[in-house]
Image: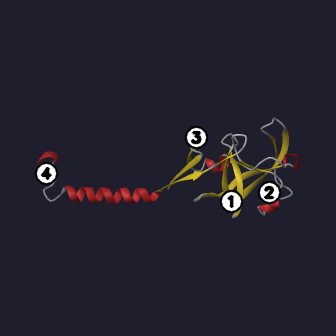
Amino acid sequence: MHRNFDVAKDVSAESITSTLQKRISELAADVFQESIKLESQGNGGLMVSASINRRPIRMVIDTGASVIALPSTAIATLELNVPADAPTRDVRLANGQRIQARSVQLPTVRVGAFQAEDVTAIILGPEAANTPPLLGMSFLKRFKFELDAAKKELRLLRVQ
């Protein structure tokens, strides 16, 4: 080895590979990934079990939604505190209807082993009470993700 690669005589292939193996192990510890099974909705949407503020909630994955969207009926279930002076914004529902929503910050959102803190969400007005909770990009963008509709699977990857 020392002749072919101009390496000192006291360096062995084993010492080089053991150093590389140690570094690979360190990198593997910094990378975390998980495949999460999804459930089909009757209309083709995919649902995931999540938690907001440690309260369970089933959400439709919506990569077209910029933020998490919650119907007003979820406020009590999730024990959310929505200040009376929370900023409002106009939103358009999937059916084209425009409504008012209040913007809030969720302390924690968890899907599988992946947790994000201080996540932006909107609380939809009472006229959208039947809208399912949507898991939007305000959570998903914090991770590398892949949605496999055929396998009904969400793969999340976090690199420290």
Image coords of residue 83 (percent x, y): 83, 59
Instruction: Name the foreground residue: 11 vs 64.
Output: 64
Disc 1 residue crowd, few under 14, some 14–19, many 20+, Cα 10 Å = some
Q: Residues within 10 Å of mark 3 (few under 14, many from 20)?
A: few
Residue type, label 3: Ala
Which residue type carries mark 1?
Ser
Please, what is the three-letter code of the amino acid marked with disc 2? Ala
Residue 112, image x, y percentages: 60, 58
- Return the disc, 1 or 2, that comes first in the chain's sequence: 1
Which numbered disc, 2 or 3, marks the residue that appears first in the sequence? Answer: 2
Of the image marks 3 and 4, the number of the one nearer the N terminus: 4
List the residue tagged with mark 2: 74
In the picture of the structure, the residue carrying the numbered disc 4 is 2
Query: What whole-number distance in Å separates the C-alpha atoms at marks 3 and 1?
Result: 24 Å
The amino acid type, in three-letter code, at marker 4 is His
Check disc 1 and report the residue beneath it: 51
Q: CA distance from mark 2 to mark 3?
A: 30 Å
Kindly report which numbered mark, 2 or 3, lies closer to the viewer in this rendering. Answer: 3
